[in-house]
Image (cartoon, rainbow, N blue to C red):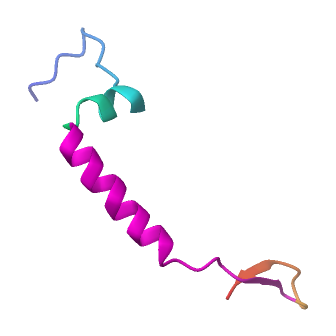
């Protein structure tokens, strides 16, 4: 299979994953996220009168 199970895998933390992204790409992603979030509306919910579960409308 080409997998060496005798060596532990390298696990990247979120901080390390972010550090690997070039600053210009980070800035673009931050701007895109901000644009998306500014257009989002909060989810409205209600409790079902029959089963009592919360429903997202």
Q: Quadrant of the C terminus?
A: bottom right
Q: Residue furthest top?
A: 6
What residue do we see at 39% from left, 61% from top?
A: 33
What residue do we see at 29% from left, 29% from top?
A: 19
In this rendering, the count of numbered labels is 0
Expressed as whole percent of the image width and height from the top left, the position of residue 1 reads: 10, 29
Say if residue 13 shows up in the picture. Answer: no
What residue do we see at 58% from left, 80% from top?
A: 41
Nearest the viewer among 50 and 37 is 37
The chief SS type of the magenta part is: helix
Q: Within the magenta stretch, is there residue 40?
A: yes
Q: Within the magenta stretch, is there residue 7?
A: no
Nearest the viewer among 43 and 30 is 30
Is 20 located above or below residue 9 in the figure? below
Residue 34 position by quadrant: bottom left
Residue 23 position by quadrant: top left
Expressed as whole percent of the image width and height from the top left, the position of residue 12 reads: 34, 26
Nearest the viewer among 24 and 53 is 24
Q: Residue furthest left?
A: 2
Left or right of 31, for residue 39? right
Left or right of 18, for residue 43? right
Expressed as whole percent of the image width and height from the top left, the position of residue 48 reads: 84, 87
Is 6 located above or below residue 51 in the figure? above
Is 34 located above or below residue 16 in the figure? below
Q: Magenta span covers which residues?
A: 23-48
What residue do we see at 89% from left, 90% from top?
A: 50
Is 56 located above or below residue 29 in the figure? below
Expressed as whole percent of the image width and height from the top left, the position of residue 35 reads: 39, 69
Say if residue 29 shows up in the picture. Answer: yes
Left or right of 4, for residue 49? right
Nearest the viewer among 38 and 48 is 38
């Amino acid at each position: 299979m080409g997998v060496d199970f005798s060596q532990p895998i390298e696990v990247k933390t979120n901080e390390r994953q972010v550090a690997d992204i070039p600053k210009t790409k980070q800035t673009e992603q931050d701007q895109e996220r901000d644009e998306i979030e500014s257009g989002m509306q909060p989810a409205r919910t209600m409790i079902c009168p029959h089963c009592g579960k919360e429903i997202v409308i």
